[in-house]
Image: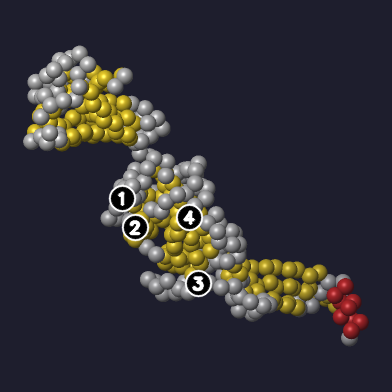
Amino acid sequence: MTFKLKHLVGTSAVALAALASAPAFAAGTASGSTITNTATLNYTVGGVAQTAIQANNNITVDRKVNLTVVEVGSATTSVVPGQTGAVTTFTVTNTSNATIDIGLAVTQQAGGAAPFAGGNDNFDVTGVKMYIDHSTSGTAGTYDPGVDVEVTYLDELAADAAKTVYVVSSVPIARVNNDISAVILTGTASESGSVGTEGADITATAGANTAGVDTVLADAAGSGGDAAYDGKHSAKDDYKVSAPVLTVTKLSRPISDPVNGTTNPKMIPGAVVEYCVTVANAAGGAAAAGVVITDPLPAQTTYVSAFGVYEGGSVAASVCSGGTNTGTQAAGTVTGTIGALTAGQTKTVYFRATIN
């Protein structure tokens, strides 16, 4: 019998076939799918074809868990001091071969180089929240306040599916030009449970392959500090403050006094003093708009209404000149409007008062 079997096998044709029972995704065939492989043995005896013999083998496809978090745009987000609703944008993709939940968390980088801003992180934004893009009601790919939904995780994200996630925060009013805040969005693979409830963090199956559906963590290391094969992935983005760099300088000079007139006048009672307020916006800063100077006069002085208040002048050798006499004085307070002040620009407001 043993000899005949060896002989028959040696003179027979063997056909192999394999069949996957579910569609393939980016990460491969869907988790839990059964792959059936059938080998067929055809043979003859005395020239007569015999009944074929088949052998089957079934494989259960295990779960390969993977995800990616990617910053959208590869550029810093420009913000201003005191801004609310400052947005950075990420794409979170389930590259597993199964539906999973993905937990979301935002952390703030503790110093060091920012990813896009060309400098170092030196402050934290505040009031940080995460929103999922609600493209059916709002504008796809654009944060829509009041439309996009605040989330802490992505629910029942199918294999190969992706969602746009917005990190929205506020910038403290005290921040200055070129300050940088880097944020990190981390996604964590979670079990797919019931709709509306985040599952537990997914862990890898320990030990040898089993007959059931095992789990393998296949994620790469992200830029935010997570490790490879830990069920997480992260990406960074940053906010860079763009603000005017304003300085204010106030000068005074005697114009005349009751004794010397206009020749070498001194600051004595009855003297007329010219006050000159200079506002400068340093190069490299953002433009300032709506610049207004208010100056309450000291009680020991009296405003010279005949001279007025000059706006938008210039200063040279401590002497102010030019501008237009369009400022105002009311209840002892002088007001001068400068308006817009671009980077590298300087403007003045000047007026006169008498020492009582």
Residue at label 1? 84
Give whichever of 211, 350 is nearer the camera. Answer: 350
Residue at label 4? 109
Considering the image in quadrants, where does the N terminus appear? bottom right
Question: Real-space Cα distance between discs 2 and 4?
Answer: 15 Å
Residue at label 3? 201
Q: Residue furthest top?
A: 263
Q: Position of residue 135 (x, y in %)?
A: 35, 53
Q: Residue furthest bottom?
A: 1
Q: Nearer the viewer, mark 3 or mark 1?
A: 1
Numbered mark located on residue 127 in the image: 2
Q: Quick check: 204 left or right of 276?
A: right
Helix, strand or loop for disc 1: loop
Count up the numbered dots.
Answer: 4
Helix, strand or loop for disc 2: strand
Helix, strand or loop for disc 3: loop
Question: Real-space Cα distance between discs 1 and 2?
Answer: 9 Å
